[in-house]
Amino acid sequence: MYLEIHNRRYTGCKYKLVDWIDELISENCSGESFCDIFAGTGVVTAKELNRFNRFIINDLLYSNNIIYNAFFLNEDYNLRILEEFVYDILNSHNIQDNFISLSYGNRYFSYNDAKIIGHIRKEIEKNKHLFNYKEYSILLTSLLYSADKIANTVGHYDAYIKNKPINDQFVFSFIKPYSTKDKTIEIYREDANKLARKIECDIVYIDPPYNSRQYSRFYHVLEVLTKGNEPNLYGEALKPKEENMSDYCRNSATSAFWDLINSLKCKYIVVSYNNTYNPKSSSSKNKISMNSINLILNHKGETKVFEKDYKFFNTGKTDFSDHKELIFITKVK
């Protein structure tokens, strides 16, 4: 069974909304190039592959960047060789303790699963010279997706589930890359506001973080797995030192959004946001108001707003019955 790009758990993933987003883009925008500047899982880019010729895909997380290269990078790969490589690793009789098993065993994964995951990660890195970057990315992304599928969490890595037995259940499954032979694909790992100053594109899709939850802290285990390093880990959740923290999760979010919109050189701007403004949990409260988004976008051009009822991410602390996903589409002046 091959894993699709949406077969991972990710807060704010737009997979269930992509048909609606695609329809709105089709009806209200035109052009040849598409930029997904906070690409997250990459599902919106995947949906738009047949609509545009040139793509710019960006996210600040190391794990998301390697995932984009695996799914979208325009480079040949030999899946048979990759499958044989993984088969040999999994049938090794010399799987030793490693950073992943010692750090995350019996926490985010069972001890045995963590040992296997860590062993595969080390073997991929040790043998990366045998593969091109697309193949290396496919191996690593397949490991990330396979590990995420069985992780002992509620869907992110802010904590692991305690006081329950963790069974061995790891199965290595390969991802299914997209065919991008006839496309121009540019993949970045940059601060969106800095990247906006360097690029030009017909349509820019913007899906920033909405609240104080930092994605680099939510997905720290996948970040450590991707980087293949052995950082010092802190606290009950075993997180490394802070890095790649977003201004969109802070009180500076509105000014960051203003700067981003004013820096863009494009014909259309499409913004995803939601209306979680009065939650019980302060971490769920939106950092940018509807009024601010409207003012900033209308300053850039004529803006339409579309809304859709949508079930929101809920840790149990947020009581909000009238949740809507919002799409703002601006035709730039």
Image (cartoon, rainbow, N blue to C red):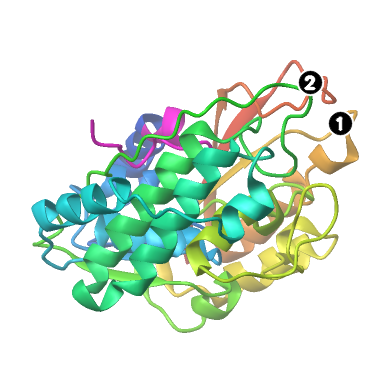
Q: Is residue 228 above or below residue 281?
A: below
Span shown in magenta: 1-18
Q: Where, by quadrant of the figure, is residue 252 drawn?
A: bottom right
Residue 101 picture location, percent across and down: 59, 50
Q: Which residue appears at 70% of the width and 47% of the height?
A: 210
Q: Is residue 243 above or below residue 168?
A: below
Q: Where, by quadrant of the figure, is residue 166 drawn?
A: top right
Q: Tell me the number on the disc at residue 278.
A: 1
Residue picked out by circle 2 = 320
Taking the view exactly as shown, the residue that stands out farthest to the front is 93
Q: Which residue appears at 85% of the width and 54% of the height?
A: 235
Mark 2 near mark 1, Cβ–Cβ under 8 Å?
yes
Q: Where, by quadrant of the figure, is residue 97 drawn?
A: bottom right
Left of 3 or right of it: where is 210?
Answer: right
SS of the residue at dot 1? loop
SS of the residue at dot 2? loop
Query: What type of secondary structure mainly makes up the magenta span?
Result: loop
Identity of the amino acid at label 2? Phe
Left of 257 or right of it: where is 67?
Answer: left
Q: Is residue 12 visible?
A: no
Left of 14 or right of it: where is 30?
Answer: left
Q: Nearer the viewer, residue 169 or 38?
A: 169
Q: Determine crowd level at label 2: few under 14, some 14-19, many 20+ residues with C-alpha closer than 10 A.
A: some
Q: Is residue 102 visible?
A: yes
As measured in the structure, the alpha-carbon distance from the residue carrying label 2 to the one carrying label 1 is 7 Å
Residue 161 picture location, percent across and down: 73, 30
Q: Is residue 311 above or below residue 156?
A: above
